[in-house]
Image (tube, coloured by chain):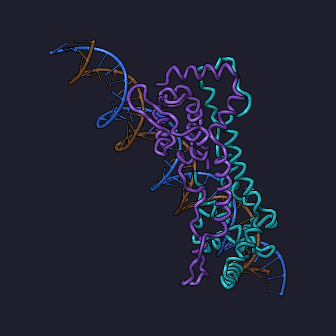
Chain colours: A purple, B cyan, C brown, D blue
Amino acid sequence: MILKSQVEWALHCCAILSGLPEGRYLSTKALAELHGLPKEYLSKALQSLSQAGLVDTTLGPSGGYRLAKSPGQVTFLDIVEAVEGETRTFVCNNIRTNNPCLPDDYCYSGPCAVARIMWEADEAWREKLRSVTLSDLERMLVRETPAKLWKDTFAWVLGRAG
Amino acid sequence: MILKSQVEWALHCCAILSGLPEGRYLSTKALAELHGLPKEYLSKALQSLSQAGLVDTTLGPSGGYRLAKSPGQVTFLDIVEAVEGETRTFVCNNIRTNNPCLPDDYCYSGPCAVARIMWEADEAWREKLRSVTLSDLERMLVRETPAKLWKDTFAWVLGRAG
DNA sequence: GAGAGACTACTCGGATACAGTCTGTCCGAGTAAATCCGG
DNA sequence: CCGGATTTACTCGGACAGACTGTATCCGAGTAGTCTCTC
């Protein structure tokens, strides 16, 4: 059970979009070059973000993506669920109903204990992701990235932002 | 990102093995019939448990599986990792190193902020799974399963346990 | 110089292809209990 | 009745196949700026 690489891509792209000045858009092409990724396939991840309403998009030249909300309002969970889907990581197939000792008329009520525990773990994972926003991420990145590199990167980005 | 169904199977099988009297073994065939699962494929999951050292096995007739430790010493995480592998659910491909603004001689130290956050969430998930043992599960199952069904099931199981 | 039309650069969505994983089946090798057979 | 050989029932492991998902590429449709051309 490993998250798709699109999740990583989407998170890094959102980190860049967080630093974009109000009203500017950045194209898939620029984001792909910045991260060394295949443009066409990266666009799938960005489309997922768009469908989830996390980013706005404009067509035409100088078009591209920008965040639809403020960085403080977008959580890691939002992004992960946009790309990966919102289904729980554990699905219960109720195999307990195949028990040959089960009377024909018996009907289980509620999810089984195994599923409940797995879902609690899933929820702990989601809760952690829900607690971190893009502005938290930006703060961490600013602290650990050399100042010059940070400045150069955003100069590069702004040179390509429409 | 959805866990394989083998995880569900392994958990339910371990729940049954937890209730087995000391020294008795239960075969793949019996476990498969009890849960309505394909015997051959279920055996893959049980082999994973065996390789992880969670269950003991004996060959020959009246052979099968039994728990290698006491139910209180086997956690959900043990079982999930035995089947699903121990790799983290998020892999960092360090795409930040593809940044064209990066000086040639620069070398990042330590994992990037995105990965650290994703790994913390992963750890929260694992921590929850680590906190629940098979004896906890057994306690929940006893409480919510009708007494007769529970009794019938283990009568059925003991009739097939070597 | 201004407005209409053509052009360009981009997003979006669908179609396609390939690889890897998940699910499932089959079979042979090895092992331990049960059975059989000869003394 | 006893001990050794055979049979049986099971685990284990590998080989194999089909379905599904993840990864990746390509192309056409649509859109918004830009450019050009005409008046």
- The front one of D32 and B93 is D32
Q: Is residue A99 left or right of residue B59?
A: left
Q: Measured from the top left, where is residue A122 in percent x and y?
A: 65, 56
In this view, A79 is above or below B109: below
> Which residue occupies the foreground of this view, A9 or A98?
A9
Q: Is residue B69 left or right of residue D26?
A: right
| Of residues A136 and B49, the one drawn nearer to the viewer in this rendering | A136
Asked whether residue A102 appears in the rendered view, the answer is yes
The answer to which image quadrant residue C22 occupies is: bottom right
Q: Position of residue A26 (x, y in %)?
A: 49, 28
Using the image, determine if residue C8 lies above or below residue A80.
Answer: above
Q: Is residue B48 visible?
A: no
Please state the horizontal and vertical placement of residue B16, each as a whole percent of the image: 70, 72
Tell me which corner region of the image, top left, top right, bottom left or bottom right, holds residue B20: bottom right
Residue A110 higher or lower than A143, as above or below: below
| Count of marks, rendered view | 0
Relative to A43, is C5 above or below?
above
A55 on left or right of B8: left
- Which residue is rendered at x = 68% and y = 28% of the image? A142
Residue B59: x and y in percent read 72, 67
Residue lying at 67% horizontally and 31% vertically, measured from the top left:
A141
Q: Residue at 57%, 40% (x, y): give it.
A: A5
Give me the residue at 75% from left, 74% from top: B19
